[in-house]
Image: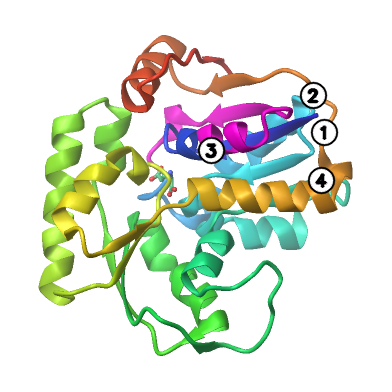
Amino acid sequence: MAVGVFDSGLGGLTVHRAVSKRLPEVAFCYYGDNAHAPYGVRDAEDIFNLTCRGVERLWDEGCDLVILACNTASAAALKRMQERWIPKDKRVLGVFVPLIEALTERQWGDNSPPREVAVKHVALFATPATVASRAFQRELAYRAIGVDVEAQPCGGVVDAIEAGDEILAEALVKSHVEALKRRMPHPEAAILGCTHYPLMQDTFQQALGAEVKVYSQANLVAESLADYLARRPEFLGSGTVSKYLTTGDPASVSVHATQFLRQPIRFEAA
Ligand code: DGL
């Protein structure tokens, strides 16, 4: 009974923490492609190839279902993977849809036409590749009308987190929020559209102000995974061991993971 969690680096640990808490009986195998992070400045071909390699490694661990806990991979590679690469007995799920469903007040699988929703001005913070893909706006347009989305590509934030530099990450978050507020002074909601960003959630919230509702993915993805597995238990893979794999240096990745998650985490070589 194992499920895989993939990210370019440390960000997917925010999702891993939430899914492990929600489904304590399931083993989760984490794969961080830290040697190749950040993905947010790579092209789609590169992101596709790296993501497929990581997902295959998780399949080898007996995880028939893999969550791409990475918006950049979900935006740049998932559709192509689902259309022509994933075999019938495996599943790879992204992290956008649960978030968009929460923002648009929809239940899972509600495919009714797009309708007006309560929030009208939404700030989106994501990596340059995710912003360039416009995948959030596309998913939103299937479900809601009249929502104004202002997107801020947050260059540098993932690099600073991966390097363990919290001070730089904080300064960059503040300047990205300021840049967005110059274009949209009063967002009602903000989407943290990169799984690394919840590691800096307090800084985002402070810079945005208490009146802005900040949506992040971890708990929403955990609920949606629990729902999926209840309906499709055949995708609980044969693996039994929870572990953390990295393509980077396990010792330094473990130190940075422990620092940001504020709990001891031990990585091994992928
Ligand atoms: N955590 C990934 C995401 O959600 C990180 C991106 C990156 O490596 O640039 O987009």
Residue type, mark 3 in image: Ala
**Residue neighbourhood size for the residue with mark 3, other residues' Cα within 10 Å, grouped as few (<14), some (14–19), many (≥20):** some
Contact flag, marks 3 and 2 (Cβ < 8 Å):
no
The residue identified by callout 2 is 239
Residue 254 x/y as whole percent: 42, 15
Residue type, mark 4 in image: Lys
Of residues 93 and 25, which is closer to you in this image? 25
Nearest to viewer (mark 4 / mark 1): 1
Nearest to viewer (mark 3 / mark 4): 3
> Helix, strand, or loop for circle 1?
loop
Write down the region rendered in magenta: 16-38
Residue type, mark 2 in image: Gly
Of residues 243 and 54, which is closer to you in this image? 243
Contact flag, marks 3 and 4 (Cβ < 8 Å):
no
Residue found 18% across the figure and 67% down from its top:
180
Residue 235 is covered by the magenta coloring: no
Q: CA distance from mark 2 to mark 4?
A: 14 Å
Residue 18 badge: 3
Nearest to viewer (mark 1 / mark 3): 3
Residue 237 badge: 1
Q: Is residue 99 left or right of residue 53?
A: left
Residue 90 badge: 4
Q: Is the distance from the Cβ of mark 4 to the nearest ligand 1 atom less than 8 Å?
A: no
Which circle's residue, 3 or 4, is located before the other in the chain? 3
